[in-house]
Image (spheres, rainbow, N blue to C red):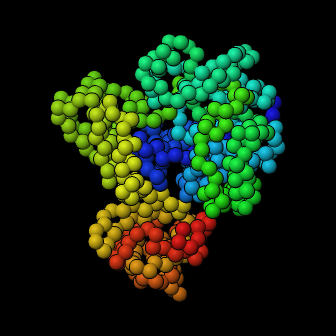
Amino acid sequence: MSSLIPCIIAGGAGTRLWPVSRQSLPKPFLQLPDGQSLLQKTFARACGLGVERVLTVTQRDLLFRTLDDYRPLNASLVALDFILEPCGRNTAAAIAAAALHAQAQHGGDCQLLVLPADHLIDNLQAFAAAVEVARRLADEGWLVSFGLTPTRAETGFGYIETGQVLGEHGRQVARFVEKPDTATAQAWLQGGRHLWNSGMLCARTDSLLEQLQRHAPALLQAVRDCIEHSTSKRDARELQLELDAARFAQVPDLSFDYAVLEHSTCVAVVPCDLGWSDIGSWQAVRALTPADSNGNQCLADTLLHQVHDCYIQSPRLVAGIGLRDLIIVDTPDALLVLDASRSQDVGLIARQLKQADHPAYRLHRTVSCPWGTYTVLEEGPGFKIKRIVVRPGAALSLQKHQHRSEHWIVVSGTACVTNGEHVSVLQANESTFIQPGRLHRLSNPAGGELVMIEVQSGEYLGEDDIERFTDDYGRAGYD
């Protein structure tokens, strides 16, 4: 059998899981009760197939956070390929880029196993068995989807209607169908011919490209042209392909199901029962936590009186009286309270925040950066206070701001500070002042974390008031 390359698609915003999931920290990074993120579980599942290389398609700005999730799990040193998107263009563009990249690097007979990064699978043995069935069908030229045996009349998923039998465990796909109404979903559950569409796919790269050329030639050509004008860098265990921003923005925004699978006659499905969940709502998240004697599931310090069947997640004490069937999700800058039966509607809130360009749609108070994190502690007219943590050996870019000054106070660790032409080393309880328009840089030369307080003041304090001149992470200009 030809070589297998898992391809993790790590996009999407996960708006139904706001306020934890946000544009800068989307759903794949959601940490589950066991401490692992959905992305980490997907990566571990892919590596568990005994592969030598894992390909990830993700946003350029999420690369370093993705690497942070992968590193502690990659003890076997699986090689890592990344395709970095400057903007989201849906799954057809992502899969086309992955297939073109895999063909160029490993040949047309290699198989791609496309895995959404934000799904949960509990039965890893059943998953591995389903992949083996899919691989045999893929070597025969099929594009192979994974269909999940329905356990309820679900109206929030797409379905696959099965056709004729293929081999011992596969079926040809008769058609893909959109989310049904309740009566239709109940009929499909009882009929036994319909499966939930998991979004996973296995196929040879030459088969994928052939079907893309047949059903979405303009999209394929646009992605091919983008890759030809993109830049890449590699070392012994890692390759990064950064897609050209202007050309990628011209690629049609289509799902792979809509662009190819719904039109192709070469699509098969492997029926399977994997203990799968798309973790698509807070109701799905709460199902991962055991309930107490009152039906409450609490990931918080709580003081409750006559509270029943509630899910509560918060970093601080939550007190409640006389509550029932609520979901309460608290973060340092946003609080969500909803009727448990309305968890699918949380995306409405996220869309309103996006339309209003509210920072709570894009960012958390704590923001991950390639060099560490910063946390906004307080802000008001003309000032902003941050806690900055810089990893050992890391450095911020050589930069300047036009509209603000910055006061830096070292709390712990060692700071190497470039301030104009002057370079100094600061220890705990020492500080410096950066004037507007002055070139400056901060780095951590020591073996422990550097923790600082930054006080910004000025007429404009937006994160886009930054011009980079030298950067260790490939960022430039006002990016």
Residue 440 to residue 2: above or below: below
The residue positioned 57% from the left and 30% from the top of the image is: 198
Please give left or right for residue 109 compared with residue 218 in the image. right
Coordinates of residue 415 in the picture (x, y in percent) = 48, 72
Residue toward you, 469 or 339: 339
Q: Residue at image x 36%, y 50%?
A: 352
| In this view, 391 is above or below 297 | below
Q: Nearer the viewer, residue 252 or 31?
A: 252
The spot of residue 408 in percent (x, y) is: 40, 74
Inspect this view and state whether residue 471 appears.
Answer: yes
Place of residue 5 in the rendered image (x, y in percent of width and height, measured from the top left): 72, 40
The image quadrant of residue 434 is bottom left
Position of residue 35 relative to residue 163, above or below, is below
Instruction: Look at the picture and state if 42 lies above or below 387.
Output: above
Residue occupying the point 34% across, 78% down: 459
| Quarter occupied by the N terminus | top right
